[in-house]
Amino acid sequence: MFTRRSLLSTTAGGITLVTLGSQALAALPKLKQKDTYKVGFAQTESNNPWRLAQTKSMRDEAAKRGWQLVYTDAAGSAAKQVADVRSMIAQRVDVILLAPREEKPLIPAVMEAKRAGIPLFLIDRNVDANLAKAGEDYVAFIGSDFVKEGQQAAEILTKAMNGEAKIIELQGTIGSSPANDRMKGFADYIKDHPGMQIIASQSGDFARDKGRQVFETLYQAHPDATALYSHNDEMTMGAIAAMEAAGKVAGKDLIIASIDGTKDATQALMDGKIEVVVECNPNFGPKAFESIEKYGKGEEIPTWVVNVDRVFTQENAAEYLPEAY
């Protein structure tokens, strides 16, 4: 039987639906066991502390092992990231680590690596599971439980607000798995708490200045807001700057739940400006390279290699601060 699958392909005009034959469903590429590997790391962007910490972790681990790291920075462009992966394929790297900017536009890169016989691991962000599957089209997803992060943020914010809040939500990059899942996790939790109402929600693209601008607009439109749920610390810090410029006090006029664990947000947590920061650990190097090594030895890799995260509050922030990035 000739099996067909549709997937997305990037073109100059955007995204096109393409149908592939049975070669798209071929076995997952294997990895020959070697002492050193040539590893491609396709980073999505480098415009915030989390991404810089992640890249440093990758570079440090490659240097520690004596492996070659082929690094690219897509500068926030899904199209460039697809091109970056194609370049790695042309350079015949042994394995690719891909941090996909968005869920659907990076499907062509995943499939092209598979057809080229190069194992690929998704790092920190996922792709659309309807179009590419872990264990079939790529080896595994290495990353956090974003839904759980959203639930944890919602739980602590709900307790802090005694179940009553009018919430502004700053979403991450539209179409990215962290934004989708953090939104879902938070919404799933508060649906059982009718007093917790999201009154405005918009993407700040995981960026500090964009988060500041978006929050400023939303808060002006909804001055009755009493809480902020932000999908990452950079947007949170932008929002706090906007609050202070408006003469408001973060932690009093608005109670804040954030995600990541940056140094700035941890200090703001200690200063009482933020109620809770749910960690999203950026130190992927050791786990990613260990997974590559195991895969090369023929060991079975779970389709989801979970990065375990912590929850930081004003009570334990000082202990974490030396680790913050």
Image: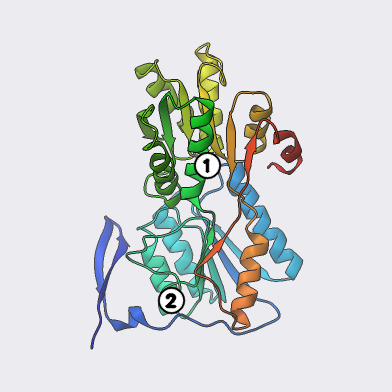
Three-letter amino acid code of the residue under disc 1: Gln
- Residue at 54 percent across and 24 percent down: it is 240
User: Of marks 2 and 1, which one's residue comes earlier in the chain?
Assistant: 2
Q: Is residue 112 visible?
A: yes
Q: Position of residue 221 (x, y in %)?
A: 34, 18
- Looking at the image, which residue is at 60% across and 70% down? 39
Residue under numbered circle 1: 152
Tell me, for residue 114, which label it has, or none: 2
The residue depicted at 74 percent of the width and 34 percent of the height is 318
Residue under the point 48% across and 37% down: 154
Q: Classify residue 28 by image quadrant.
A: bottom left
Query: In the figure, 207 relative to 109: above or below?
Result: above
Q: Quadrant of the N terminus?
A: bottom left
**Left or right side of 266 for 106:** left
Report x, y in % for residue 302. Answer: 53, 71
Q: Look at the image and tell me in which quarter the C terminus lies.
A: top right
Q: Is residue 209 visible?
A: no
